[in-house]
Amino acid sequence: MNSITHLGGEHCVTGSCHLLQANGINILVDCGLAQGNDSKSRGHVPVMCTRFFEEWPIQPKHIDYLFLTHAHIDHTGRIPELIQNGFAGEIICSHPTKALLIPMLTDAMGFTDLSEKEIHQLSKKIDEFSWGFEYGHEFKLKKGITFKLGRAGHILGSAFIQFKISAQADAVTPLEDLESSDTYSIIFSGDLGNKKTPLLPDPDIPDPCDLLIMESTYGNRLHENRENRLERLHAALTRALADNGKIFIPAFSLGRTQEILFELDRLFSREEWQNRRIPVFVDSPLGLKITTLYTNLSSFWDKESRGLQQNGDHPFDFDHLYSVPSFKDHAALLDIPGPAIIIAGSGMCTGGRIIDHLISGLPEPQNDVFFVGYQVPGTPGHELSAMSHQPTNVYLQGRKVQIKAKIQQLTGYSAHADQQGLIDWVQSMPSKPGKIKLVHGDPKAQKELRDKLIKIGLNVIEP
């Protein structure tokens, strides 16, 4: 029977996982971990935003293919568990995602109960199962199914995936209106990014499709104007560093860290900042590893960034940028005086080295915290980003921490398209999609985006 079953991320932002069953082939699109309030759990397995494997309509051993839209953990984090439960199919993604997948998952597995031997064995299997494919080319699977990857502009390697399913005699029930055509096409958007994002080509224009399954993270919000965000960063840094304090930037190791370094590199090329030489520290072993991989994957950068590199100006490297690889160096960094800019994970303050910096730095009024990405409700990052500048308290790893530092949000740095960006992407299609199903967003965001899409004449499926 041909069908689509949403196994995770249907009505929340994290835990993306979708099962496409067509022509006797079982295809999984993403297999991610839920985070924050999305991960209300029974034991250690998220149940609010993702289903237990035993609740799936088929078991992992019967899945033929796993397609990945990108390497973020909320889209890939359950892959080790999927393999432990019997999956032995092919993992298909873009070439950059293939390169980024093992470092991301190996790091994530380090926060589980798995032994080093188990982590090594699982990493080896993931590497053996996974294959990288080019953007913009149609490839055949089997039984009349083809796929094509398009650039999604979210992070390096991110892709939306189009499947074309030809009618087969052995298909019991066609997908919706498959009977009206010889071929039925489905696009999974994955996470969509913005135009004019540093390092990344703009999202590709998608082909027409019968069904579009689209993210809606910022379905009810608009970003600040991205055109002048470098000037806003300049103003924010100028204010924050006026009292020689420290700036803490919680950032995802993959994507956001490299983007912030790019922007700082552009800013520090100005004479006024060259004279100040504010030290910038990347206090994230994974972030450092991913940044090196980004350099190795420069053929996938946008034209501007490749041009900078070819002219000897590496787009995220400058004289007063320092790496902090060891825990000993991290401990020493906690005590350095300002001014300084410290970039550390995790991006939502759920763990990692940023916690130590916040515990140490939040009680000091001369310090600032810059939030540059989406914060899932239920995470410390969401709690902090929602606070005013008035002194208050937050609990970090069980410790009560007084907040006197200033909290700032720079929303122009979101890696997700906002409401208008999502609408524009759909409208860029040569013709309207037959139907749209919204996923990967909270109910309020989905409702508002659905209303906007219906208003412009698009057919959006009820939740």
Image (cartoon, rainbow, N blue to C red):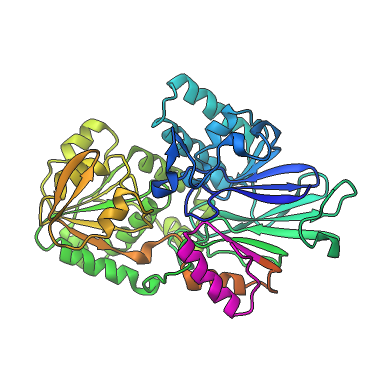
Q: Residue at x 47, y 19 (%)?
A: 117
Image coordinates for residue 3, horizontal then vertical, percent: 73, 51
Question: 356 or 321: which is nearer to us?
Answer: 356
Q: Residue at x 83, y 45 (%)?
A: 143
In the image, taking residue 98 as reference, residue 295 lies left or right, namely: left
In the image, is residue 287 above or below residue 260?
above
* Residue 268 figure quarter: bottom left
> Can residue 329 be found in the magenta stretch?
no
Q: Residue at x 44, y 63 (%)?
A: 197
In the image, is residue 120 above or below residue 428?
above
In the image, is residue 441 above or below residue 65?
below
Q: Residue at x 69, y 66 (%)?
A: 207
Number of dots carrying numbers: 0
Image coordinates for residue 255, horizontal then vertical, percent: 42, 52
Image coordinates for residue 76, horizontal then vertical, percent: 52, 42
Question: 62 or 302: which is nearer to us?
Answer: 62
* Residue 366 figure quarter: bottom left
Magenta-drawn segment = 436-463
Image coordinates for residue 64, horizontal then vertical, percent: 71, 38
Residue lying farthest to the bottom in this orientation: 456
In the image, taking residue 53 as reference, residue 284 lies left or right, namely: left
> Can residue 442 be found in the magenta stretch?
yes
In the image, taking residue 226 as reference, residue 187 lies left or right, namely: right
Question: 343 or 162: which is nearer to us?
Answer: 162
Visible residue check, residue 181: no
Visible residue check, residue 451: yes
* Residue 309 figure quarter: bottom left
In the image, taking residue 306 as reference, residue 266 lies left or right, namely: left
